[in-house]
Amino acid sequence: MDSITSFKDLPFFFSVFVFVYLLGYLYLFRRWSPPSRPLASSCLISLLHGVSAVFLASRALLSDPNRGFSSPNTPSQIN
């Protein structure tokens, strides 16, 4: 993966996770006790990250035309 593209996307993903944390802390869990609110907001971020990772990984696996548990051999393995 090219490091320039990953740094280019970093502000977007950071802002999404900050937004989700603040949404959970200030709105979704506003009636929870103050010690529990940061933990609940952090769990919300973990849930968002886990669900999105499953969907993106599934999409990557299903879109691969060479689907399966094996991969093609590299040129050094063929010899």
Image (cartoon, rainbow, N blue to C red):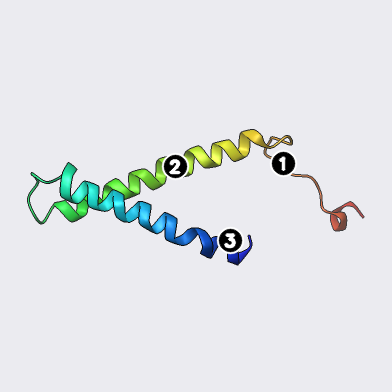
Query: The N terminus is located in which quarter?
Result: bottom right
Percent coordinates x, y for residue 54 in the rendering: 48, 40
At x 36%, y 44%, the residue is 48
Question: How many callouts does the rendering have?
Answer: 3
> The residue tagged with tag 3: helix, strand or loop?
helix
**Residue 52, numbered label:** 2
Crowdedness near tag 2: few (<14), some (14–19) or many (≥20) residues, C-alpha within 10 Å:
few
> The residue tagged with tag 1: helix, strand or loop?
loop
Sequence-earlier tag: 3 or 2: 3
Sequence-earlier tag: 2 or 1: 2
Query: The C terminus is located in which quarter?
Result: bottom right
Q: Which amino acid does label 2 sit on?
A: Ser
Q: Which amino acid does label 3 sit on?
A: Thr
> How much space separates mark 3 and mark 2, taking CA atoms?
19 Å
Percent coordinates x, y for residue 6 in the rendering: 55, 61
> How much space separates mark 2 and mark 1, taking CA atoms?
25 Å
Task: Determine which residue is flagged by label 3.
Answer: 5
Percent coordinates x, y for residue 74 in the rendering: 82, 53
Q: Are marks 2 and 1 in contact (CB under 8 Å)?
A: no
Q: Which of marks 3 and 2 is in front?
A: 3
- Quarter residue 64 falls in: top right
Q: Which of marks 2 and 1 is in front?
A: 2
Percent coordinates x, y for residue 8 in the rendering: 52, 62
> How much space separates mark 1 and mark 3, taking CA atoms?
29 Å
Give the side of residue 45 with respect to residue 6, left or right. Answer: left
* 30 w.r.t. 3: above or below: above
At x 8%, y 55%, the residue is 34
**Residue 70, numbered label:** 1
Crowdedness near tag 1: few (<14), some (14–19) or many (≥20) residues, C-alpha within 10 Å:
few
